Image: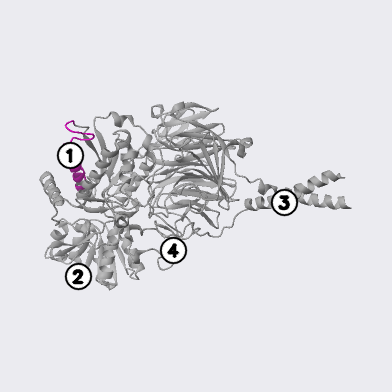
Amino acid sequence: MLSKVARKIVRRIVFAGVPFFFVFACSALPQSAEPQKPATEAPPAHRYANMPDEAVPYGKFSKPYKEWYVDNDTLDYFGAARERVVQEIDTSKTVNIGFLGPLENNYEAPYGQAMLHGAQMALEEANARGGYGASGMSRGRPYALKIHNDSAQWGASSTEAVKMLFDEHVVAVLGSIDGASTHIMLRVSLKLEFPIMDTGTTDPTVTETRVPWLMHTFPDDRQQGYTLADYVFKQLKLKKIGVFRTHSRYARIGVEKFFDEAKRMGRVPPLEVKFERGDQDFSTQLRMLQNAHIEGLVIWGEAPDAARILKQMRSMGMKQPVFGSSRMAYPALLEIAGSAAEGVVTTSPLDPTRTDPQWQEFRKKYQAKFNEEPDAYAAYAYDGMNILIGAIEKKGLNRGKIMDGLREYYGKTYDGVGEREEFDYTLNNIAPLALAKVDGGKFVYLPAQRRESSAAHSGAGAP
Amino acid sequence: MKSKQMWRWFLGVVGSLALLGPACAQKPPLYTHWENFTTANGMPDEKVLSVAVDGDRVWAGTENGLVLIEKGKIQKVYKPEDGLANRVVTGIAVDPASGDVWLATFGGLSRLSGGHFHNYTNLTSGLANDITYGVAIQDEYVWVATTAGTNRFNTRTGEWSIFSEKNAPIQEPWSYGIAVAEKKVYVAIWGGGILEYDIAGGYWKPYTDPDGEMEIVLFKNQGLIHIIVSNIAWNKDTQMFWASTYFGLSGYDGRNWHNYLSMDSGLASDFINAPKSRGDEVWACTDKGLSYLNFKTNTWVTYRPNAKTGRGEIVITAPDKKVTTMETSTSLAHNYILNMDFQGDDIWVATATGLSHGIRETTRESNKEGKVHEHTTASR
């Protein structure tokens, strides 16, 4: 039996406690698994990669729950690399920069050699200016390039990166061309934290990982695919386009964005066929394309292979217009295909017929030094190395701070020999591409068609 | 009569309290005391990439060797000169049957047995590549995540298997992490989503990002949140796997997906290096702190050092998004979290500047312990 006082206390506790209890208990119960609205309805400031309207994924059906790569903190870094001291770097007599590119025993070696030459030229010019930390009459430390061949056997680039980091104590790495190799090196960079200046891959996914250790100068396949789709479907108004590509990761990833835009425009390519690099006979695949009644053909591959395809195609009486990737815009196409190449249109990351003094001076020096014409791989490597050296000079010999220097290009431009490069929030160059057309036995360059750029939104200018 | 009614009513309330009590008790565990192992007290490198608990022993993989911690002290540091395959130790697994310690390194796979190392490399074994990121034990098998595919090594027969784009449903072979469940093995693939291996059937099943696009999440709980998966954890209590990505956190219960982004939850950041899970706990090692989710109550807690004060910060996000901040005198070594493991109620956390031991002191979890700031807007 409770006493009167005790009853009073219990009543007070119960009455005071019940509402509190229910509020507390309810908040602790499981929450609904129903989809929630995003926290903000505000539209992003820019469209990623200056994507054309037709290429926006699900654009006709739904607004995405979340869009990546459109915020200016996309690659922000919150680790401890800025405070990390690598004694070997500080005491080294040279400032070492790693180079990873296909140089031998590799189908991509010609591009790798050009990339190496471009990087070497920029480095030698920096050393001619006195090297790292030069001021007035006193010379600084010379830059040294630590060259590694990218054998492009999957996985090899990661071991090369580890060697560069621990045996050669590089402050940063320039490379590579193969998309898989670059991805593999990027994974190592996330663990070991070093900047990568990627000046050669066309794989658009290397800048889409949010790993904050990579900058990319070479116009990628996203931009190439959009440019080609615009030309083929919007300007020429073709409908049935066949695709003929190498059996490689380069081409598989390469045609993806062209396919995406074609698909979203209701122009799904009726047939995609493949060939192996170095193949001589394409008649089976060409007959399949012929039977598919294509109005045009996109080839994604290298110039010598494309040239042999063109010759065989024309000899079979196939007169459809042919379009292609940037690796077709090489003299080998004209030399091997001859008149069969007439009318071919490819994307072109570079217009070598430009007359601006910067390009002309670079071209002249490059020709004198290497006895060859510079191509896009040389030009973007030269620009990439200059951007990298600029960041090193500005930020010092700390890998984290060098990457900060590269990150200053968020939404900014760089006027290099590859012309104006425009960097988005993934540090990818999204400048529009020119087209190259074979006309009268030579390449004629059609000016880039400018889509609205995020760099333009954000007050472009060098950092 | 009146007192009888009162008794009945009182017993009813007490009964309700007893029934609903467990729900109230689901207050998130708070780690209010941290002990840090850094270069200042014997760690061979500030960056700790991996950690694994084996009873009283704690193994930590750093950028410059393997560390054994026991009884609150660093007992031994192993380096390549001791036989370790490489200085960079990215993954650790202890075989419960033999006690052998298996180590994923940037120079191959190392096995520490009886105080001696035996190394497996690309040249000396069936290891797909010397750059390895994760290792896990499934009975007599050792699974290894490498840059060129996923390996399975039979420790009894010495047979190696390689799973890559050539014999598994993936386009890229770059595996990053492995989690072993009772009947399955899960592999986190960079650019390939999640692969599920059926142990009995010996076949693979892929889980990929259903919107197929790198640049978007089409719907909140669409399926796997992104194709680039950085690591994976299995929760045997809830029978769920949790995948970390640099684009949010994904959990799968066998029927539904549960995705979390920093914009719609208390997750500290979408950039997640690794998950860990047990009971109702889901942990996310992010670049902006260590986040905890009570999956049942949808309550989030993030631990991070306060850069200005050097003290610890605990950010509690209630299901109604109400945010409470607490300060503690000790803190995680760094906000950039790479990995973690459980040791009873305690946790061990690999960070960019040291290994942190989170000690749960239930008596000190009250608000009296630190300054408390409550506000209703997200603090990130």
Per the rendered image, the range of residues in magenta is: A114-138
Amino acid type at image mark 3: Val
Q: Where is residue B309 drawn, in percent x and y?
A: 48, 35
Instruction: Evaluate whether label 1 is on the same chain as label 3.
Output: yes
Q: Is residue A118 magenta?
A: yes
- Marks 1, 4: nearer the viewer: 4
Q: Residue at x 28, y 65 (%)?
A: A229
Q: Residue at x 16, y 37 (%)?
A: A128
Crowd tier of the residue under label 2, counting other residues whose Cα lies within 10 Å: few below 14, some 14–19, many 20 or above? few
- Marks 2, 1: nearer the viewer: 1
Q: Where is residue B81 drawn, in percent x and y?
A: 38, 27
Location of mark 3 (residue): A18
Crowd tier of the residue under label 4, counting other residues whose Cα lies within 10 Å: few below 14, some 14–19, many 20 or above? some
Q: What is the number of callouts on the image?
A: 4
Location of mark 2 (residue): A316
Task: Please give the chain letter of the residue carrying mark 2.
Answer: A
Q: CA distance from mark 4 to mark 3?
A: 44 Å
Q: Secondary structure at mark 1?
A: helix
Amino acid type at image mark 1: Glu
Task: Please give the chain letter of the residue carrying mark 4.
Answer: A
> Do labels 3 and 2 touch, CB within 8 Å?
no
Which badge, 2 or 1, comes first in the chain's sequence? 1
Q: Which mark identifies residue A124?
A: 1
Q: Secondary structure at mark 4?
A: loop
- Marks 3, 2: nearer the viewer: 3
Which badge, 2 or 4, comes first in the chain's sequence? 4
Location of mark 4 (residue): A63
Amino acid type at image mark 2: Met
Residue B230 appears in the picture as rendered: yes
Q: Where is residue A432 drawn, in percent x and y?
A: 26, 59
Instruction: Evaluate whether label 4 is on the same chain as label 3.
Output: yes
